[in-house]
Amino acid sequence: MRWAVSRDGILRRMLALVAALFAALLLIVAAQGAALAAPGATGGGSTGGSPSSSWDYVALGDSLATGFGARKGYVPRYRDYVKTDTGVTVKLTNLGKNGWKSTDLLNALRSDPNFRGAVGGAEVVTWNIGGNDLRAARDLYKDGTCGGTDNQDCLRASVETLKSNWQGITGEILGLRSSTNTIIRTMDIYNPYVDEDKGADSWADDGGLNDFQVFKTYVDDVNAHIAATSSGTNIPYAQVYVAFNGAYGDKDPAAKGYIGPDGLHPNDTGHKVMADLLRGLGYAPLK
């Protein structure tokens, strides 16, 4: 009898130990599951749809991105909007470069590890580019050295290069980040020379066209390409051209008070308009 009682006691103790071990295992599994389900505390390349409490914002572009000539450019304004509207802390890396053309930005995205690393780890990416491409061709046209019987060869070449580079830039960005888990935004191109070019006729043998009429054709072509590319890749874009130049592209943005003293770059009012347009696109897919 003593042996049977001792055996029963041993069995009870063994069962109690197994039950305790099982309960501890359940607690460990539950804790791991909660940790996996919780959103990260910081940004840096999150891959899910759940927003984190900190986002990295990378801005790309030319002197518009740097805010040249303004006290506060559209990039820091947009950063502030993102923070205000989402409640998320936003860390800005502004990689805009004064004077850059579309080829410069494309090359950087293809081969510069700083650019590729920054974009690859960002939750927010914006870019603007192309104004310097068109401006350089316009200068040649006005000098009468653009080429061709109509003095427009360089304008045609510039537009084709810009459109090809735009495709490449879009592809590089989407290769580093996806529009399904990143706020990716861009914008089209405004014309700062409307009134100036309406009063100029640099090439007499063109049927009486003034410089604005000639140049507008190419601006429209580029902006139509930007619109089509943005639609095809699900990247919302800010319609700066309409905001600055009107629905028909024939309004001078300086007359609206959007251009600074140099006659080219936006002033603070113009940069606010650009940032407001980006803000109006919302913050999908993260918010």
Image (tube, rainbow, N blue to C red):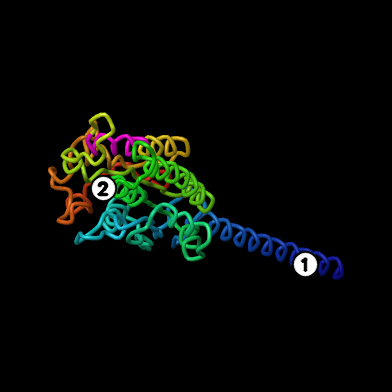
Type of the residue with mark 2: Met
Residue 214, magenta (yes or no)? yes
Q: Which residues are magenta?
A: 210-221
Q: Kindly identify the residue that appears in the image at 56 percent across and 60 percent down.
A: 31
In front of the other: label 1 or label 2?
2
Query: In the rendered image, which residue does mark 1 sit on?
Result: 9
Question: Along the line of sight, which residue is nearer the eye, 158 or 116?
Answer: 158
Horizontal relation, residue 98 to residue 248: left or right:
right
Mark 1, secondary structure of its residue? helix
Question: Disc 1 to disc 2, how far (Cα)?
Answer: 80 Å
Question: Along the line of sight, which residue is nearer the eye, 44 or 96?
Answer: 96
147 versus 122 height, above or below: above
Residue 100, magenta (yes or no)? no
Count neighbours of disc 1 (C-alpha within 10 A) and say few if under 14, some if 14 to 19, many if 20 or more: few
Count neighbours of disc 2 (C-alpha within 10 A) and say few if under 14, some if 14 to 19, many if 20 or more: many
Type of the residue with mark 1: Gly
Quarter occupied by residue 280? top left
